[in-house]
Image (cartoon, grey):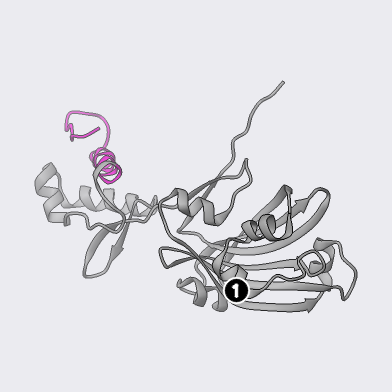
Amino acid sequence: MSTINKKSRTPLYLQLMNVLIDKIQSSMDENEQLPSEREICDFYDVSRSTVRQALDELEKEGYIYKVQGKGTFVSPKRLDQDLAQFYSFTEEMKKLGKNPISEVIGFEIIEAVGKIKENLNVNTNDLIFKITRIRKANDIPMLYEISYLPYERFDGLNKLDLETKAMYDIFKNKFNVSIAMAEESFEPIITSKLESYYLGVTEGTPSLKIERLTYERDKVIEYTVSVARGDKFKYKVTLNNKK
């Protein structure tokens, strides 16, 4: 729909929403400013209340964002991640035409205890790499991520590797890892003070906690806990009815 039909039974604000969505998707860039409310009113010959209702709904659905005193802008695209297949943050960002960066803010060797020991299926006090990273796309923080790796399997891993190469490339090329599968669980959370600091969002903002177990054959070689910004990610699953 590219025009407003005042004889249609479809509410004007819904028609305007569809018109603006078409415009955003076909000819506008991320963070580009939309025309003012008055300009939209004049161009489409609709009331200010119709425009405001349409813009409010577009904001709720994530198409636009508002900056007080400056105007309305096109929201950056969310990562539309298909959970039906194994994926890498670095590769997914490249597919979107973004520059992925992993900022390593913590690189430690610790002893395995509690949930870490259980998830990696190692013995108490076995040595574990604990790697804390901020995953960015075009310098925008996307994930606050902590990975735990068994030291014995990745003896020789260093911080420089992780700052210059994708983790799964290191697994494959330096340690001859062949990943068999991964399991992930998802949980909506409210960002903590620390997480919000690194993600550049307000404390208490809704986010998504993702826990991943990565397997080499039948052995877990990675346990990762990530906090994904709720305004940057969208996940989907394809369900096949195979008989």
Image quadrant of residue 214? bottom right
- Quarter of image, res 146: bottom right
Assign the N terminus to one quadrant of the image.
Answer: top left
Please state which of residues 172 and 237 is positioned toward the viewer in this rendering.
172
Q: Position of residue 238 (x, y in %)?
A: 59, 35
Q: Position of residue 136 (x, y in %)?
A: 48, 65
Q: Residues within 10 Å of mark 1 (few under 14, many from 20)?
A: few
* Quarter residue 145 falls in: bottom right
Task: Specify the quadrant that holds the C terminus.
Answer: top right
Q: Is residue 2 magenta?
A: yes
Q: Considering the numbered disc 1 on the image, is that residue within a helix, a strand or a loop?
A: helix
**Is 220 left or right of 190, judged from the image as shown?**
right
Instruction: Identify which residue, 86 or 168, lies in the foreground.
Output: 168
On the rendered structure, is 88 left or right of 99? right
Q: Residue placed at 64% from the left, 57% from the top?
A: 168
Q: Is residue 135 magenta?
A: no
Tell me residue 188's x, y (percent): 60, 59
Q: Does residue 148 appear to the left or right of 209 in the view shown?
A: right
Q: From the viewer's perspective, is residue 71 above or below residue 95?
A: below
Furthest residue in direction top, as rendered: 243
Q: Nearer the viewer, residue 97 or 51?
A: 97
Residue at 78% x, 51% y: name it: 216
Q: From this viewpoint, which residue is outermost toward the right?
A: 123
Q: Which residues are magenta?
A: 1-25
- Tell me what residue is drawn at x 50 percent, y 77 percent: 197
Badge 1 is on which residue? 160
Please state if 210 lies on the left or on the right of 47 as rendered. Answer: right
